[in-house]
Amino acid sequence: MTTHSKGPGLLQANVGILKSHMGTFYPGSHVIFRGHDLHTELQDMDWVELYVFGITNRRFSKEQLRLMHSIWTYTSYPDVRLWNNRVAALAGSSRSTGNLGVSAALAVSEASIYGRGIDMRAIDFLIRTRQQLADGCLLTDCIKQELDAHRSIAGYGRPLVNGDERNQHILTLAHSLGLDQGPYLRLAMSVEQTLYSGRWRMKMNYAGVVAALVADLGFSPREYYLFLFPAFLAGMQPCYIEAADRPEGTLYPIPCIDVTYEGESHRPWKLKDNNDCHNTRS
Amino acid sequence: MTDKIKPHSIRTRIWREEPEADNPFVARAAYCHGYDVYGEMLGNARWVEMLYLLFRQEAPSSSQADMLETLAVALSNPGPRDASVHAAMCGGVCGSTAASSLMAALAVGAGQYTGAHEVFSAMQAWATCGTDVEAWRRQSTQTQETSGSIWPASEHFPGFDPHGVSTATTVKQTLACLAGHGCGEHLRWLQQNLSAMEEMAGSPLALSGVTAAALFDLGFTPDQGEMLYLLLRLPGAAAHALEQRPLGYKKFPFGTVELEDAATQEAV
């Protein structure tokens, strides 16, 4: 497109016509999706197949797609207490729209202690560790390095409990599909064994299992991140619906006295009349 | 201990409410960091004073309030060419909800290029390098660790415009006005060392960089600065979204896409 690597020349070269290899639609005629006619070539794809094709530009076997479906299914919890689901439900209780509530709920699913934040760290850890082992490092050293750097290992341990009810189900399914023999899953199991038998006593959680299973399908971290976007989605709508069906404002009502105040006592408001900048950095 | 007594209690250092006698769910008084919001602040406090108080736990001096207000004016409208405002207009132009237009502006304006995470990174750099040009030079040569992050890697030094040629007049005006408030030393230092800093970054200073220095001088943390930058840029996004609504999509650029064949080959 242009030889400019940055600067107004690069911007100018991108004014006007948009170049794309992803696709476009021709109003009233047809749609191209990654080089294929959506309605005549891809029309029989199921939705997850199309979704991962859009992300990876790759086709997957029926077994692999079944696993991907179930990765989402097994982590769709209609529990209003979960922080992301609660956002959707509070939107329902506040009589906001379902789209706004669920969109915001998906956005907050990019958290640092669960969801996309942990997912990215989990797949990154597995990819790095596998490379380090190939370079001759010992697994225990890799684990210690990770713990020194982050004080935790993404994919192991859990905010509420140590152990994960989803793991046995997804592993059973992966086994039945012949998708449980990949190098990343073996590595993830070895890490769990080391962590659990050592002083850390941490078990692998769902983020660890899924990162390994999907890395074994050949996903890059970015592909994995984008693939997981709707992971919690199916649990959110029930939370919104139930809250919307209750009398308005009755989800998590909080009386004034149930807010524990730990701040300054009452003090009179008076604008400081000097011009000195207290609390500034110098 | 309090948690055991009240398992459903929210803990806060910011806000205290006293209930009405006839309804425990309605406040008869609300205190922000100890100040009576409706009894004393209302009519006496400026919006920026409340903003500062909420984040910093103390009321600002008049100079700090003036400086924050100056910054708020400078950031209030990034203009319709800005990607975050463009996103808000995409909501407005087709009649999407008000909240979705602002959510669009927040999402697009959150990133590493002209966005709030850039301000966050620039404030971290101020905390690390302070007023030491050599420290900034060392910082600029260090590889940023982005492995395992949800954020895409930054492709330029935060706070500087990778597509700029020289310091924009508006950026210089904002820097001069903010530095004139005399709060903190970093803005003045930046003004005095602008050439060295731009040489270090390989690009001219951007408004995000001025903002980072200003928020740092006002005592905000990078986390607080990221939030404030998101907040303070919303008014323009809202106004432009509303402006586009009656104009409709036919008067909003749609563009033309040309497909490139080379990259359509499926990966094996």
Image: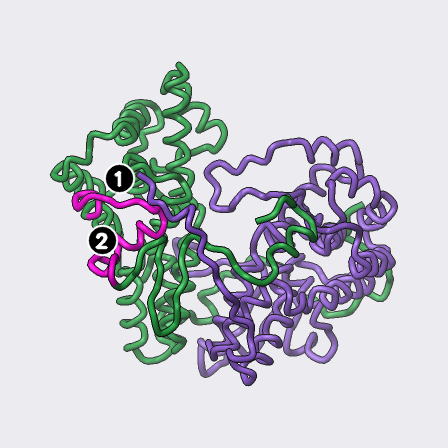
Chain colours: A green, B purple
Is residue B219 visible in the rendered structure shown here? Answer: no
C-alpha span from label 2 to label 1? 19 Å
Q: Quadrant of the C terminus of chain B?
A: top left
Instruction: Give the farthest residue toward the top.
Output: A136
Q: Is residue B49 left or right of residue A88?
A: right
Asked whether the residues under marks 2 and 1 belong to the same chain, the reply is yes
Residue at (73% x, 53% y) in the render: B206
For disc 1, the neighbor class at 10 Å (few under 14, some 14 to 19, many from 20) is some
In terms of image quadrants, where is residue B56?
bottom right
Residue B102, position as x, y percentages in the image: 53, 69
Q: Can residue A51 be found in the magenta stretch?
A: yes
**Disc nearer the start of the sequence (2/1):** 2
Name the residue beneath numbered marker 1.
A163
Asked if labels 1 and 2 touch by Cβ distance under 8 angstroms, the answer is no
Specify the segment rendered in magenta: A40-65
Is residue B108 visible in the rendered structure shown here? Answer: yes
Helix, strand or loop for disc 1 = loop
Helix, strand or loop for disc 2 = helix
Q: Which of the pair B171/A248 is nearer the observer?
A: B171
Q: Which of the pair A123/A161 is nearer the observer?
A: A123
Q: Is residue A199 left or right of residue B95?
A: left
Q: Which mark is residue A73?
A: 2
For disc 2, the neighbor class at 10 Å (few under 14, some 14 to 19, many from 20) is some
Residue at (50% x, 76% y) in the render: B98
**Pointer 2 chain:** A
